[in-house]
Image (cartoon, rainbow, N blue to C red):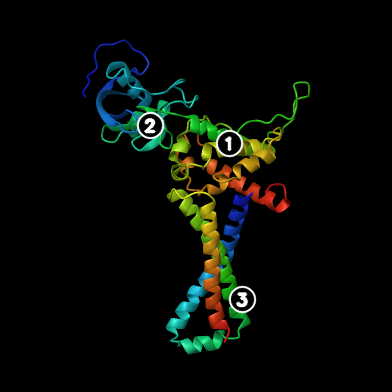
Amino acid sequence: MIEVRLYAAQRLSAMVLAPLVIAHLILILLAVEGGLTAAEILDRTRGSVGWALFYGVFVLAAAIHAPIGLRNVIREHTSWRGEVVDKAMIGLGILLFMLGGRAVLAVVVG
Amino acid sequence: MTVTETDRPAEIGSEPGSETGTLTVEVWRGKDDGRFQSFTVPHRANQTVLDIVTWIQRHAEPALAYRFACRVGVCGSCAMTVNGKPRWTCRTHVGKVAEDGHLRIEPLRNLPRLKDLAVDMTPFFEKWQAAEGRFHPTKTRHDPLSTISPSSAKRKAADAGIECINCGVCHAACDVVAWNDDYLGPAALNRAWTLVNDERDGGKRTGLDAVSRSGGCHSCHSHGSCVEHCPVGLNPTRGIAGLKRMSLVGLLTGDAG
């Protein structure tokens, strides 16, 4: 059943995202409050397998989680139904993964 | 419209007891494009909302349509929206729900309106069927009776949801039902939960499949409105959570999905 799989995927991705989002927010605060420049941040992230994994998993989990949630919102609050919604959400997931992946590559490669 | 009480014998809808003033009662008339009609109704001690509606029909507006049968909270026929909340009107005391002597009575939400306070319950019961809310026998009359321990975990889970009177109050209270036409709703899913826990029922797999489709148990947001409003104190949200767990286990074990 596709609904059970989507339900499981959304819960699992949420479990992954929760600690990553908290760590990400703390990182932003530390970087801003600590007065790090972009160059200093890039020095730390470039070539780092750890940061690549951290944000790679983050992007993958977000790309899975967001379209499933948005699919529910669309089906509950609009008259948009059927396979076209599912296809649009698959497209959104791919788009999020590509955009996020591009950002991760930009900070860890180079 | 203002109506004053005249001499009349005691009858259904006229509770014995001293009058304690009057109530202003607004009642929905018509179908979707109807309007509220106002009545002044004598307020008596121990009066229920169903008594009020019956008084109006008997003394003020004979054409008022509403549904009731047992008047004692068993049949589940008389649910209506009272001052914005779904309630079983036969066991709702006016004194507990009237606001400054005012009542507003409407048909149940989330079901097609027929006339005045009567709704069409067909979609409600169709969803019961869609959720496989019926017993699937595994034995014949020639087999010995099944021995089920009342203290088994499964029987306890089934017993916790078995007293549903099909009144539709939870269905009307549920926002997800309002948002999503496909959603089976708390009553149908509660029924499915009692059946998948019934060791005599042969349709567990069919039932789990039925509640795992689009609009099934996974659509529940666990808002808990069904629990809040259920007149017999059931907890459909807990049963729905159980169905979600069971479907996940089925997915992992290959028993479902």
* Circle nearer the viewer, 3 or 1: 1
Mark 3: give few (<14), some (14-19) or many (20+) Cα within 10 Å.
Answer: few
> Residue B19 at what x, y percent from top left?
27, 21
Q: Which mark is residue B130?
A: 1
Instruction: Give the residue displayed 43% in from the left and 82% down from the top.
Output: A32
Instruction: Give the letter of the chain under mark 3.
Output: A
Between A6 and B190, the one nearer to me in the picture: A6
Left or right: A2 as drawn, with respect to B175: right
Q: CA distance from mark 2 to mark 3?
A: 56 Å
Residue bearing the label numbered 3: A53
> Residue A34 at what x, y percent from top left?
45, 85
Q: SS at mark 3?
A: helix
Mark 2: give few (<14), some (14-19) or many (20+) Cα within 10 Å.
Answer: many
Quarter of the image holding residue B32? top left
Between B121 and B27, the one nearer to me in the picture: B121
Q: SS at mark 1?
A: helix
Q: Amino acid at mark 2?
A: Pro
Residue bearing the label numbered 2: B107
